[in-house]
Amino acid sequence: PSTLFHNESNLYALSLFNNFFTGSIPSTFNQARELVFVNMSNNSFTGTMPSNLYKLTHLVSLDLSSNYFYGNVEYVFST
């Protein structure tokens, strides 16, 4: 849901792998500004990755493998 990351500014790690989730990653994902580790691999996420991922300045590890994303990854992190 789009409210998943509201008021989650202190979230450090997020592990949602192997859950058969579908749909797109909410654009509010970047509101969890303290995220360091994210694993959303092995689901069925679709669409483009949120273009505001670059706002996650503490991010060290991001695993979105084995989903159905399309588009340019370089664009997301080039800002």
Image: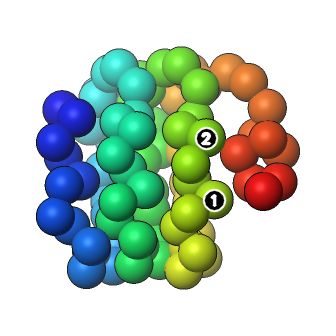
Secondary structure state at the residue bearing disc 1: helix
Depth check, front residue: 79 or 24: 79
Asked if labels 2 and 1 touch by Cβ distance under 8 angstroms, the answer is yes
Q: Relative to 79, say whether 10 is above or below.
A: below
Q: CA distance from mark 1 to mark 2?
A: 7 Å
Q: Residues within 10 Å of mark 2 (few under 14, many from 20)?
A: some
Q: Quadrant of residue 64?
A: top right
Expressed as whole percent of the image width and height from the top left, the position of residue 52 reads 56, 48
Residue 64 got which mark?
none
**Amino acid type shown at disc 1:** Tyr
Residue 51 got which mark?
2
Q: Residues within 10 Å of mark 1 (few under 14, many from 20)?
A: some
Residue named by callout 1: 54
What colour scheme was applied to this rendering of the protein? rainbow
Expressed as whole percent of the image width and height from the top left, the position of residue 68 reads 56, 21
22 horizontally vs 4: left or right: right
Q: Quadrant of the C terminus?
A: bottom right
Q: Quadrant of residue 71?
A: top right
Expressed as whole percent of the image width and height from the top left, the position of residue 7 reads 16, 64
Q: Relative to 50, say whether 60 is above or below.
A: below
